[in-house]
Amino acid sequence: MPILIVDNRTIKFQLKDYFEAIKLLKHSAKKYPFKEIFLYNGYYSGLDGNNAEFSFSEIQLSKETEGVLRKNIESGQFKLGENDVLYY
């Protein structure tokens, strides 16, 4: 099964709109024919691609990916931050 990455191409967004989009996508995710679904936000500020900032918000994860993430969190390889946000 394919994986879908939704690229947020807006220059900026209201946080309220972001959370509403996540809620809508998660609510409808089981209807989509994708194994995994992510919302991508990001940019880079240099011609060489340095100074990049980006995030992937999961809408739907496969059991395999969820297991790998859980294993890496439990082992301490990945650290959860505020509100259980994964930073690495």
Image (cartoon, rainbow, N blue to C red):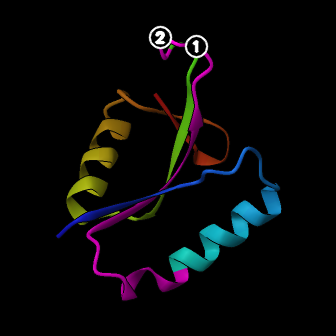
The mark found on residue 48 in the picture is 2
Extreme-front residue of the structure: 47
Q: Return the x and y of residue 24 as percentages of the image width and height.
A: 61, 79
Tell me the amino acid under the disc marked 1.
Answer: Gly
Q: Which residues are magenta?
A: 27-49
Q: Secondary structure at mark 2?
A: loop
Nearest to the observer: residue 22 or residue 84: 22
Distance between mark 1 and mark 2 Cα atoms: 5 Å
Nearest to the observer: residue 4 or residue 72: 4
State the quadrant of the N terminus: bottom left
Q: Is residue 27 left or right of residue 14?
A: left
The quarter holding residue 15 reads bottom right
Residue 42 is inside the magenta segment: yes
Name the residue beneath numbered marker 1.
46
Q: How many tags in the picture?
A: 2
Tell me the amino acid under the disc marked 2.
Answer: Asp
Vertical order, 3 against 86 (above or below): below
| Mark 1 Cα-neighbour bin, 10 Å: few <14, some 14–19, many ≥20 | few
The quarter holding residue 32 reads bottom left
